[in-house]
Amino acid sequence: MQNELERFVTSIPDYPKPGVLFRDITTILSDPEGFEMAVDGLIEELKGLDFDYIAGSESRGFIFGAPVAYATKKGFILVRKKGKLPRETISQEYALEYGTATLEMHKDAIKPGDRVVIIDDLIATGGTTKAMIDMIERLGGTVVKCAFVMELKGLNGRKVLENYDVSSLLSYEGNR
């Protein structure tokens, strides 16, 4: 799958700064074949797995997670930036390169014993995903898998998630 899907990724040199090779997945989304291949690949990663919900973070986790939830006939849990959800929430702060951010989810989204799959576009440092895991577990849920479209291995996100089942459709050795 790596070679087939990789042809839909656009590599942009020196963005956002000199020396960085940015991997742009918006070209996966804009191509019907690429988008279908990514969603189908994520669905394939879940074959034979027992789970109740898909959780995705704002915004590309929504884009990839929602069609997977639909195809697998599971509910979809939105994890959003602070202040965007209308009912009672729980929150988790996490580190960014420069500062921190906070994610929230509805407090009633997960019940004890629920089995959850996290889907997102990218695993880099693992911070966003770990924040989601922390909230899911605080509510009594269990994260049974984390599936990503792309992984930047040089940023060591798998190390942060070493106690979880992690997979990615695309993998790049560097940190960009």
Image (cartoon, rainbow, N blue to C red):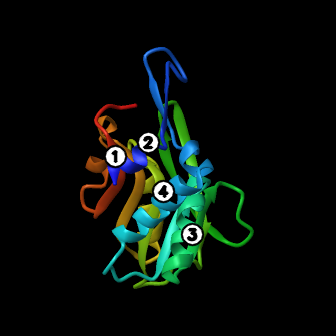
**Amino acid found under the numbered disc labelled 1:** Asn
Left of 11 or right of it: where is 81? right
Q: Position of residue 156 (x, y in %)?
A: 29, 41
Q: Which residue is mark 3?
A: 67
Is 84 in front, or is 51?
51
Establish if 1 lies above or below 171.
below
Between label 3 and label 2, give the one nearer the viewer: 2
**Amino acid found under the numbered disc labelled 2:** Arg
Q: Which residue is mark 2?
A: 7
* Lower position in the chain sequence, tag 1 or tag 4: 1
Q: Pointer 3: residues within 10 angstroms few (<14), some, or many (20+)?
A: some
Q: Which residue is mark 4?
A: 120
Q: Pointer 4: residues within 10 angstroms few (<14), some, or many (20+)?
A: many
* Lower position in the chain sequence, tag 2 or tag 4: 2
* Lower position in the chain sequence, tag 3 or tag 4: 3
Task: Work out how far the residue at label 3 is from the one at label 4, CA to CA, in angstroms.
Answer: 12 Å
Between label 2 and label 4, give the one nearer the viewer: 2
**Amino acid found under the numbered disc labelled 3:** Pro
Is 48 in front, or is 3?
3
Query: Considering the numbered disc 4 on the image, is that residue within a helix, a strand or a loop?
Result: strand
Question: Which residue occupies 53% across, 34% down?
Answer: 99
Q: Check whether the beta carbons of the residues at disc 2 and disc 1 lie within 8 A of each other.
A: yes
